[in-house]
Image (spheres, grey):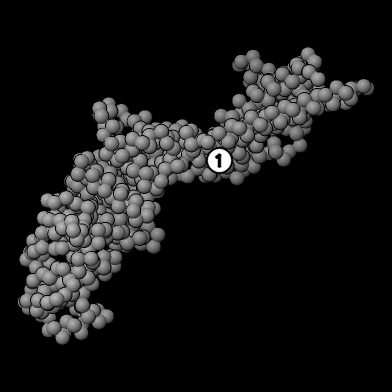
Amino acid sequence: MLPTPDEFEILALSLKVAFWSVLVSLPLAVAVAYLLARSSFPGKTLFDAAVHLPLVLPPVVVGYFLLLAFGRRGPIGALLDDWFGIVVMFKWTGAALAAGVMGFPLMVRAVRLSFEAIDRKLEAAASTLGAGRLAVFATVTLPLALPGIFTGMLLSFARGLGEFGATITFVSNIPGETRTLPLAIYTYTQVPGGDEAALRLSLLAVALSLAALFISEVMVRRATRRMMGDDADSRH
Amino acid sequence: MTLTVDIERKLGAFRLKTVFEAGEGVTALFGRSGAGKSSVVNAIAGLLRPERGRIAIGGEPVFDSERGIDVPTPRRRVGYVFQEARLFPHLNVRQNLRYARLFSRTLETPGHFERVVELLGLAQLLQRRPGNLSGGEKQRVAIGRALLSEPKLLLLDEPLASLDGHRRNEILQYIELLRDEVRVPILYVSHSVEEVVRIADTVVLLSAGEAVAAGTAEEIMGRPDLRPTAALFEGGSVIDARVVDQDLEYDLAKLAFDGGILMVTNVDALIGERVRVRIRARDVSIALDRPQRISIQNVLRGTVAEVAAERGGVVDVSIAVGATVLRARVTKRSADQLGLVPGLPAYALVKAVSLERRITGAT
């Protein structure tokens, strides 16, 4: 059962949306995770709560807020349109934005945990060897946090593939533009005789999720093995 | 002066208030656990900020509260070897060793890397990762890594603390090599008399955050008045000697010192080499006549120089043997029975086997 051209298009769109949502939110998530793991500032608890909000809010609410903020007349949407001519509403980029926002807390959590697990004495050692703060971050902190970063990327990617509520509220359900896998499955279940198509897409979603899980597991294991300090030549 | 420290800072229950200077060679910062040794070293490295004071390395101020100087750690150019090696687990040994090169603005001294690798015996380890190095190997890499940052001062904070006896000796030998081959001043933090006696040129004694005494190893380790402060050096004396002969049949070494000859079980030193021997006061007995038919190998003729006050039924007696002062710990009862008073000729008896290898060391 190979995917039909239509199914292939849906699959490609879903992957594109999830991929870009992860890529764009990654630097921000790493920065926020570092801030939460390493610094204390007034209002930190509130900030932390705000970061976690998409995790607990109904996705439709998140989508509605995005609509308010990024719509053509929303404060951010108007700015993007006027200055850069960028419109995200009803575009696949908007779907990526929704997926990114929904996956953001998951990514931050995973990255933050791995930052917190790093022995800060190693960072002190690096500074005695001449590394400034930025260099310590780039050569010690970040590499040691890699397993957590991979985990966070996977969680966010999976969340993006499955994103439904915020997406359909924010960018609607436009075939070829914003109709990702979950939206397509939903659409098929709403039309008579669409059961088989819905089932085929659902099986595709299962295969996709398993593949993502497998790839991430391999990456985390490799990164962890490096951290544990195994030699390349001692792998029997 | 290579290092000048005059700092103050609140530290838990007491105030760190330390003033000392260190010159060339190895300076030991010596004191019991919790005396504030690591805090002093951290302040020198810039990892701990004193409330007030001055720190200068190689004549250059790196901290001065009055002039508002506080050079950040990366630019202080101190090589810091921590108790736990703190190697970067994601880098192999070569990358760990070369880490400081990433940030150095000076040109690398040609051959420096190869020399350090050879000196510390790291050639076989270069491709390995820290995760499967032994404790001793890790510490050697850590020393090499610090050296290769071309520091103006090397800080060793109890580098042997996490090692077992055998590894300790191995690393100590490497540190001795460092002292003799690489001209970099070393501040060596320790609470072990053995280590300090073996490698230090100068000793700074730290107690409750204060540097209470400073001087040569012989002076500080021999001073009975400091014993209550340090409480670690169980009384004794330190003797500078030279290996003059080795008895291979009996596996003994003959050491000449200013005052006579000392027989000890064989040391890891060649004839002609200088060694430092620490003799614990409780290993020294006193006789008024030269004893006959006795197992003790070292019978040293001298004069009673001082009889210290009694403490718990025990007195410490100083016996001058040539220019060297040996301390003997005997009961008050024996001191009275022998009638020990300053000026009385006496023999100090030292068992050869009481001088173990670990309390003798090449210098």
Residue B128 versus residue A93 in the image, above or below: below
| Amino acid at pointer 1 | Ser
Tell which of A129 and A33 is nearer to you. A129
Q: As drawn, is A182 to the left or to the right of B219?
A: right
Residue A193 versus residue A142 in the image, above or below: above
Q: Quadrant of residue B305?
A: bottom left
Characterize the local packing of mark 1: few (<14), some (14-19) or many (20 or more) Cα atoms within 10 angstroms: many
Q: Residue at x 39, y 48 (%)?
A: B135
Residue B85 versus residue A23 in the image, above or below: below
Residue of label 1: A114
Residue B320 shows up from this direction: no
Q: As drawn, is A69 to the left or to the right of B311?
A: right
The image position of residue B251, as x and y in percent, is 20, 58
Q: Quadrant of residue B284?
A: bottom left
Q: Residue at x 48, y 33 (%)?
A: A232
The image position of residue A55, as x and y in percent, is 70, 38
Chain label for disc 1: A
Q: Residue at x 43, y 45 (%)?
A: A121
The image position of residue B39, as x and y in percent, is 35, 53
Q: As drawn, is A62 to the left or to the right of B175?
A: right
Number of residue marks: 1
Residue B342 versus residue B275 in the image, above or below: below
SS at circle 1: helix
Tell which of B323 and A172 is nearer to you. B323
Residue at the right extreme, as displayed? A192
Q: As drawn, is A200 to the left or to the right of A93?
A: right
The image position of residue A165, as x and y in percent, is 77, 30
Q: Residue at x 14, y 59 (%)?
A: B254
Q: Quadrant of residue A180?
A: top right
